[in-house]
Image (cartoon, helix red, strand yellow):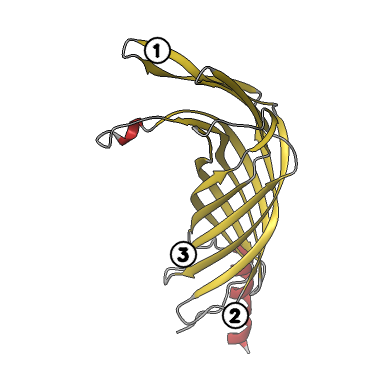
Amino acid sequence: MCKAQEEKTWRLGIQLGSAGNQAKYSGGSSDANARFHQNEFGSGALSIEGRYDFNRKWMLTAGLGIHSIGFGYAIAENYSLLQKDKHFTGIQSDFAVLEMPAMVFYKFNPNCKNSKWLIGAGFAESMVGDQTINKSGSQANDGSSNVNYISSTSSTKGGIYWNFRWSVAREKTFKNNSILNASVLFNYGFNQVATSTVNYTIDNQTYSHSFTNNGNFVGLRLTYFFRPFINPWEKSRKAASAVKTIAK
């Protein structure tokens, strides 16, 4: 049996997710050693989500959450097939981001299994602290000493940054009126949030590259919305309407 989509309904939910954050080359040497890798930065995400269903077609979501952005670098090494974890010498710097997103969604008609598609877009306000992180990595040299041959300095300028985001989602409403929502989220930052410079030496040649990070990412989010709140005004109105109907 198909359920009608909800109208004028408030809910709270818990959201978990992961994202791949992208940094772009911005300066320094444009030639890199073949052993050098600029890694995609991955992070988790956790937030509290609020939701209001205006009618059968439209809903608004807003939340408060935290995720990370950053930079990752690595140098490929000779390694044993018995110890594959020695394949790369890597360093990583990450910065926490507090976000407050607000999005509007269009809801397609549900099927008879109470599942439906949604598309949405909106903005997110991100807050980042002022921070500088220095990282370095070393490799064994002739089995005796260590040579510090890759290092980075990454920093953020504390402030508030605005992002545009859009999403495609699929959700299912259960018999107890809770909802499980799975979505793909695309985030585009308007301004530079963080910068990083990496230096490394291979075969007695030194390289230096700079990268910037606008907070852009593509992520997967899974949200569980609890049963809707009971609106006392709506409940009183329905009760009064029922009394009038009986009186007639």
Label 1, secondary structure: give it: strand
Residue, disc 3: 178
How far apart are labels 1 and 2 at the CA level?
Answer: 84 Å
Please name the amino acid that badge 3 sits on: Ser
Q: Nearer the viewer, mark 2 or mark 3?
A: 3
Which one is nearer the viewer's eye here, 248 or 54? 54
Please tell me which residue is depicted at 72% across the width and 38% down the height of the picture: 161
**Residue 107 coordinates in the image, percent (x, y):** 62, 71
Image quadrant assignment for residue 235: bottom right
Picture layout, residue 43 above or below residue 242: above
Q: Nearer the viewer, mark 1 or mark 2?
A: 1
Which one is nearer the viewer's eye here, 70 or 120? 70
Picture layout, residue 122 above or below residue 95: below
* Left or right of 78 on screen, residue 18: right
Label 3, secondary structure: give it: loop
Image quadrant assignment for residue 139: top left
Residue, disc 1: 146
Please tell me which residue is depicted at 42% across the width and 68% down the height of the picture: 176
Which one is nearer the viewer's eye here, 235 or 147? 147
* Left or right of 157 on screen, residue 148: left
Image quarter (top left, top right, bottom left or bottom right) of the C terminus: bottom right
